Amino acid sequence: MPDRHRNFIHGEWRDARSGLTFPDINPSDTDDLIGFFPQSGPEDVDDAVTAAANALPAWRRTPAPKRAELMFRVGEIMTRRKEELSRLMTREMGKVLSEARGDVQEAIDTAYHIAGEGRRLHGITTPSELPDKWAMTIRQPIGVAGLITPWNFPIAIPTWKSFPALVAGCTVVLKPAEDTPLCATELVRVFHEAGFPAGTVNLVHGGGPDVGAPLVRHKDVGVVSFTGSSEVGRQIAESCGRALKRCSLEMGGKNAQIVLEDADLDLAIQGSLWGAFATTGQRCTATSRIIVQRSIHDRYVERLAAEAARVRIGYGLEDGIQMGPLINEGQRTTVAKYVDIGKAEGARLVCGGAAYREGRCARGFFFQPTVFDRVTPSMRIAREEIFGPVASVIAVDDLDQAIQVLNGTSYGLSSSIYTRDVAGAFRAMSEIECGIVYVNGPTIGAETHLPFGGWKDTGNGHREGGVSAFQAFTEEKTIYVDYSGRLQRAQIDNQPALESRP
Ligand code: UN1
C-alpha cells in the first residue's frame, strides 16, 4: 500500500482540511505509485501562513549565527542521507542517479554556504558627514516567505530559497511542485530533525490555483519567491505588484552555446551533449540552441547527432543509464509538439524526434535526444522554451553574428562560448545579455555560492545563490547614531573642509 503523506504545519503533520489527496507516480514507470499527498486548498494555506506568522517574532529575535547553527545541522543530516535522498529523487523525478546526487549535493553546498553567512549578513558602516555621528546599515527579515518551487531540481531549488530565507530570519511556507512532493516532504523532515522550531518551516502540497495563488495573495506573506514558467511568473508579479509585495522570480531560458571554428571541438561536443540532454533538457539552464560557425557546422552537426543517438535512455537507478524520462505525459506532449513545429518551420531533424518506448521504457515518459539543424533565429524552436531534450543548431558567419543571435531571444539566463581566442571570449563575456556566461564550459553547472538568475524575461532582477540570495528576503535599514549632544542638520550644517577654513 503506497504511503499517505501530509502537510507540515506548526510542527505537525496534517491532512488537507478537505481530506482529498493526489497520487505521485514514477515517471520512469507509471505502474510504480509512490504515494498520496494532500490536495490542499486556501484554508490549509491560511493555517500554514498563520503558523509561520506566529513563529516569526521569536525566530527573528534569534541571533542569525544561532539560526545558522541549525542550518549546519541540515547540511550534516543531508550529507548522512545523501544516497537515500538521491535514490528517492530518481524514482520520483526521473533524473539519473548521478544527477540526483548532484541535486542533493547542491542542497548540501547551499546549507554550508548559507550557514556560514549567518555569521556575516554584512551591512555597511560608513563615515557620517557630521562629527560625532555614525552611519550604518543592517539587513532584517521581511517576514513570512512564500516559496513556490519546481520539480526539475526538487531538493536543490527549495533549498536555494528556504535556506537564505530562514537564516535571514524569515519563516517559510513551501508549496512544492505536484510532480515531486516526496522530495519536498523529505527536505522538511530534515528541517524537523535539525530542530527548527514549530512554525518556522511549513509545507503545503497541492496545485497552483488552489495553493500557490492563495499563498501569493495572503496578506501575511511578505515576500514570494518563485521558480517556474514566465507565464505563471508574470501572474505572480502582477499580484505582488498590486500589493506592493516583494517577489523574486526565476523563469524560463533559451540558453545558447556558441562554438567558434577555433574551439576545441571534442570539448565543445561534450559540452553540447551535457548541456542539452542532461536532466533530459529539463533545466532552466539547458542548452537549447547551439550557434556554430559555418566553416565547422557540417562536421559539428554530424558528430553531435552521432553522439546523441548513442545516449543510453532508461530508468536512472540502473547502471550506465545517461538520460531519464520527461516528468509527465503533458511535458512529453509539449516536446513532441515542438518537434512538429520545427519540422513545419523547415528545420531539418537530424536525430531523435520521437518518444522512446523500447522494452520497459514503454511504461515511462521517455523521449529521444533530438537535434534540429538549419534552424533560423526567427523559428519558434529557436525562440521558445521547450524544456526537453531538443537542441537547435543555428549556423553563423562569425562571432558578431553569433552574439547577435544569442541575444536575440526574450530570455537571458545562461550562455556559453567555446573558443581559444582570448579577445573573442572577453568580447562575448561583455556583450552577452545573460545572467550567466560560461567560457569553454556548457550552459549548465552553476555553483551555489555565486549569484544565479537571468536578464530580460528570465527574471525580475533578483538573484538566488551567493550572498545575493539574502537580498530577496531582507529589508535594508539605515541607522544614524548622533552622539554629539546637539541638533546637527545634514546638508545644512555644512562645515567647510579643514584646509579651506580661513
Ligand atoms: C535550473 O535549471 O532550474 O546550473 C537550475 C545548473 C544547476 C541548476 C539549474 N546547478 O544547471
Image (cartoon, grey):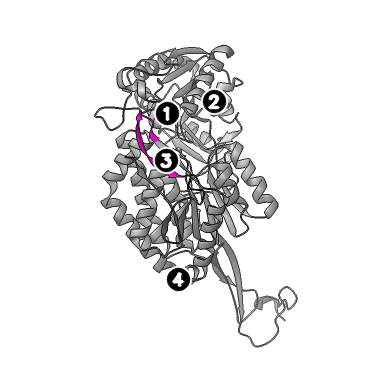
Residue 180, numbered circle: 3
The amino acid sitting under disc 3 is Thr
Disc 4 packing (10 Å; few <14; some 14–19; many ≥20)? some
Viewer-side label of 1, 4: 1
Q: CA distance from mark 1 to mark 4?
A: 43 Å
Q: CA distance from mark 2 to mark 4?
A: 51 Å
Which region is colored magenta?
Answer: 25-39
Viewer-side label of 2, 4: 4
Viewer-side label of 2, 1: 1
- For label 3, the SS is loop
Residue under label 4, please give it: 62
Q: What residue do we see at 34% from left, 57% from top?
A: 74
Picture quadrant of ligand 1: top left
Give the residue at the far bottom of this rendering. Answer: 485
Magenta stretch holds residue 188: no
Is residue 271 visible in the rendered image? The answer is no
Where is the N terminus found, in terms of image quarters? top left
Residue 292 at x, y percent in the picture: 48, 21
The amino acid sitting under disc 4 is Thr
Viewer-side label of 1, 3: 3
Residue 402, numbered circle: 2
Disc 1 packing (10 Å; few <14; some 14–19; many ≥20)? many
The amino acid sitting under disc 1 is Leu
Left or right relative to 368: residue 427: right
Residue under label 1, please give it: 326
- Please tell me in which quadrant of the rendered image residue 402 appears: top right
Magenta stretch holds residue 27: yes
